[in-house]
Image: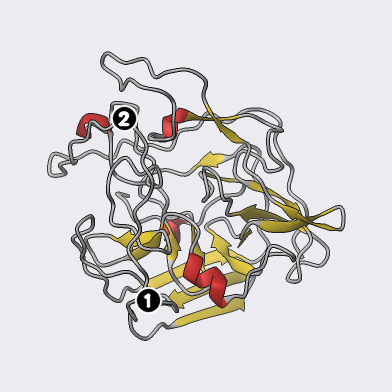
C-alpha cells in the first residue's frame, strides 16, 4: 500500500502556463474580463464503444484505452467547439507505489494531469490567453465562463485531433460509479505520478469529509493597462491564490485519506467543487507518457 505523503507548508509558485510558442501556432484573441455562468451542452449522445484495460505488473499500472468514455457526451462539433470526437490510442503508465517529491511540480501546458478509469484524460488547462498572447501572464480559466469552449455536461470537450478530455468534474462518470457524498468517493482515476484521484469526499479521522480546495480569489482588482482590468472574479487562473488552511487540501488539491482501495491510507488527489477542481500540480514525479506537448 502507499504510504502517506509529506504535505508542504510553503507556498508553491502557481505556474500553470508553459510558454510553448511556435511560429506556426496562432492563438485566439480574447479580451473578456468577466466570468459568466457556464452553458453546457446536454450529454445526450452515445459516443460509441468504450475500451479500457488497466493492468498492474512489475510495479507499474498501465492504462490502454481508446479514449471513448463509458457515458453519454454532448454533441460535437458545436458552436463553441468545432471538433469531432474520435477514437484515440491511449497508452499510459504510472508507478504502482508512487512516492512524493521534495517539492511540488506545476502542471504545465502539454501535459495531461491524469487519466480516468474509463480511459479519458484529465487535461484542465486551456490554450486561451488574454489578447491571444501566451506571454501575457494571464490564462483563461476553462470553467470561468468568460469564453465559450463548447463544454458538455461532463465538463469536457474535444481537441483538434478528436481527443475528448475532462476540464472539470466528469459528471457522467461519477454517476456511473454511483458516487454519493455520504461515503468515500469511488476511485475516479490515476494522476500522472501514480497517486489515485477521487471525487469530492474522503475519510479524515474516520469520518466521511467533504474535501475542499485551499485556493481563494485574490482581493481587489487586476492591474489593468497592459494587463486585464476588472475584479478578480475567476475569469483567469491568475485570479486565484493558494492560501494554506482555508480548505483541507494542499496546493496540489491533495491530502491523506483512507479508502477501500487503500485501507492503510494514502495520499490522494481530489476533484473539488471549487477552483481548481482538477489539481494543477503534482506531489510526485509525473510519468513522461502523460506528456503530449513538444518534447
Label 2 Cα neighbours within 10 Å, binned few <14 / some 14-19 / many ≥20:
many
Lower sequence index among marks 2 and 1: 2
Q: How many marks?
A: 2
**What residue is pinned by disc 1?**
68
* Rendered view: 282 above or below 50: above
Instruction: Give the residue displayed 39% in from the left and 71% down from the top.
Output: 90
Residue positioned 32% across, 40% down in the render = 146
User: What residue sits 40% from the left and 51% below the top?
Assistant: 111
Q: Residue furthest bottom?
A: 49
- Residue density around tag 1, few if under 14, some if 14–19, many if 20 or more, within 10 Å: many
Give the answer, above or below, for where 210 lies relative to 47: above
Side (left or right) of 16 relative to 3: left
Picture quadrant where residue 261 is located: bottom right
On-image quarter of the N terminus? bottom right
* Quarter location, residue 157: bottom left
Instruction: Indicate which disc residue 279 carries.
Output: none
Q: Element at badge 1? A: loop
Picture layout, residue 292 above or below residue 248: below
The answer to whether residue 265 is left or right of residue 22 is right
Seen in the picture, residue 263 relative to 6 is either above or below; the reply is below
Q: Nearer the viewer, residue 179 or 105?
A: 179
Along the viewing direction, whichever of 169 and 260 lies nearer the viewer? 169
Q: Position of residue 193 (x, y in %)?
A: 57, 55
Closer to the camera: disc 2 or disc 1? 2
**Label of residue 33 in the image:** 2
Q: Position of residue 211 (x, y in %)?
A: 68, 50
Amino acid at each position: 500500500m502507499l504510504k502517506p505523503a509529506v504535505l508542504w507548508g510553503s507556498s508553491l509558485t502557481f505556474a500553470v502556463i508553459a510558454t510553448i510558442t511556435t511560429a506556426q501556432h496562432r492563438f485566439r484573441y480574447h479580451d473578456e474580463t468577466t466570468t459568466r455562468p457556464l452553458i453546457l451542452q446536454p450529454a445526450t449522445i452515445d459516443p460509441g464503444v468504450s475500451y479500457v484495460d488497466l493492468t498492474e505488473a512489475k510495479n507499474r499500472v498501465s492504462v490502454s484505452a481508446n479514449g471513448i468514455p463509458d457515458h453519454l457526451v454532448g454533441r460535437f462539433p458545436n458552436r463553441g467547439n468545432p471538433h469531432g470526437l474520435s477514437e484515440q490510442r491511449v497508452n499510459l503508465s504510472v508507478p504502482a507505489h508512487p512516492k512524493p517529491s521534495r517539492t511540488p511540480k506545476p502542471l504545465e501546458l502539454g501535459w495531461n494531469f491524469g487519466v480516468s478509469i474509463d480511459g479519458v484524460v484529465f487535461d484542465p488547462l486551456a490554450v486561451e490567453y488574454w489578447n491571444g498572447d501566451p506571454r501575457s501572464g494571464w490564462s483563461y480559466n476553462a470553467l470561468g465562463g468568460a469564453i465559450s469552449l463548447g463544454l458538455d455536461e461532463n465538463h469536457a470537450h474535444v481537441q483538434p485531433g478528436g481527443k475528448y478530455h475532462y476540464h472539470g468534474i466528469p459528471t457522467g462518470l461519477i454517476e456511473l460509479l454511483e458516487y454519493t457524498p455520504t461515503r468515500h468517493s469511488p476511485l475516479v482515476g490515476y494522476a500522472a505520478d501514480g497517486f489515485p484521484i477521487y471525487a469530492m469526499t474522503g475519510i479524515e479521522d474516520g469520518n466521511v469529509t467533504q474535501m475542499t480546495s485551499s485556493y481563494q480569489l485574490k482581493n481587489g482588482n487586476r492591474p489593468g493597462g497592459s494587463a486585464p482590468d476588472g475584479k478578480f472574479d475567476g475569469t483567469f487562473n491568475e485570479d486565484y491564490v493558494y492560501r494554506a488552511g482555508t480548505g483541507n487540501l494542499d496546493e496540489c488539491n491533495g491530502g491523506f485519506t483512507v479508502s477501500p482501495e487503500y485501507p492503510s491510507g494514502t495520499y490522494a488527489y481530489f476533484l473539488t467543487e471549487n477552483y481548481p477542481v482538477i489539481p494543477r500540480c503534482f506531489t510526485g514525479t509525473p510519468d513522461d507518457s502523460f506528456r503530449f506537448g513538444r518534447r
